[in-house]
Image: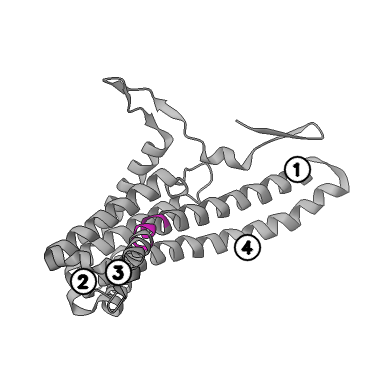
Amino acid sequence: MIIINLNNNFMASPLEQFELVTLIPLNIFDYNVSITNATLFLFINLFTLLFITFFSIKSNFLVPTRWQLIIEIIYEFVIVIILDNLGKKGERYFPLIFTIFIILLVCNIIGLIPYSFTVTSHIFFTFGLAFAVFVGINIIGIKEHGFHFFAIFLPKGAPLTILPLLVVIEFISYIVKVFTLAIRLFANMTSGHTLLKIIAGFSWTLLTLGGFLSLLHLFPLLILFVLIGLELGIAFLQAYVFALLVCIYLNDVIEFH
């Protein structure tokens, strides 16, 4: 843990919130499979999704409940993303895109709750998800086109003299998609939460000064409330961008754009 000393007022580092803490040490065949705070909040996110889903399908009334309305709004939003980028053929991939979107949305929003843990702020989670999606997209491409799928690395009409170089460039740009998916989500969530912690710590430091100076903490506190609203928007936006890029990458392997 990193501690910052400001005139004998100790304040935890804003990066402390991303620290992995072992809750239940566990080793199997010399492999560390301990339960950490990241594992705990992954289960919390899962149970939150199951809770919302249960209450959204429990009612049989013609007039939808609030839970049903939330799910229906998300459903319509995701289906619009799919139809705009994949067309009718993309409807069969709706369960995949919908699951990715709602999981990321719940993880991002729960991470904004004080003293919680944001799993999407860790590169191991975002890269693992991006890599799994990338592998799945390639399997779909091979299933759709067979070995002709690898023609995606051969630009049409390219001169034979520079074809090997172009193939290498196309392959690298194709592999980079995994990192763009992972790093974009990880970087945005990490930077946003770090900024919130810095502003909150600054406000607390002013409050502990006492006297007239303690009133100044209201200014960073007001900024903090504004940033929290902004982070809620970013939480939604990052889930949307991830789902959108998955649709675009799917369309690329299906249509060979």
Mark closest to the chain's N terminus, 2 or 4: 4
User: Relative to residue 148, is residue 165 drawn left or right?
Assistant: right
Residue at x 35%, y 60% (from the top left corner): 168
On the image, the x and y values in percent for residue 31 come to: 31, 24
| Nearer to the camera, 247 or 140 | 140
Residue at x 40%, y 43% (from the top left corner): 124
Of circles 2 and 3, the one toward us is 2
Task: Establish if 122 lies above or below 133.
Answer: above
User: Relative to residue 138, is residue 74 drawn left or right?
Assistant: right
On the image, the x and y values in percent for residue 87 come to: 23, 79
**Residue at the disc numbered 1:** 205
| Nearer to the camera, 49 or 242 | 242
Residue at x 39%, y 41% (from the top left corner): 41
Dot 2, how many residues are within 10 Å of its Cα: few (below 14), some (14-19), or many (20+)? Answer: many
Mark closest to the chain's N terminus, 2 or 3: 3
**Residue at the disc numbered 2:** 254
**Residue at the disc numbered 4:** 226
Task: Establish if 1 lies above or below 180.
Answer: above
Quadrant (top left, top right, bottom left, bottom right) of the N terminus = top right
Span shown in magenta: 173-179
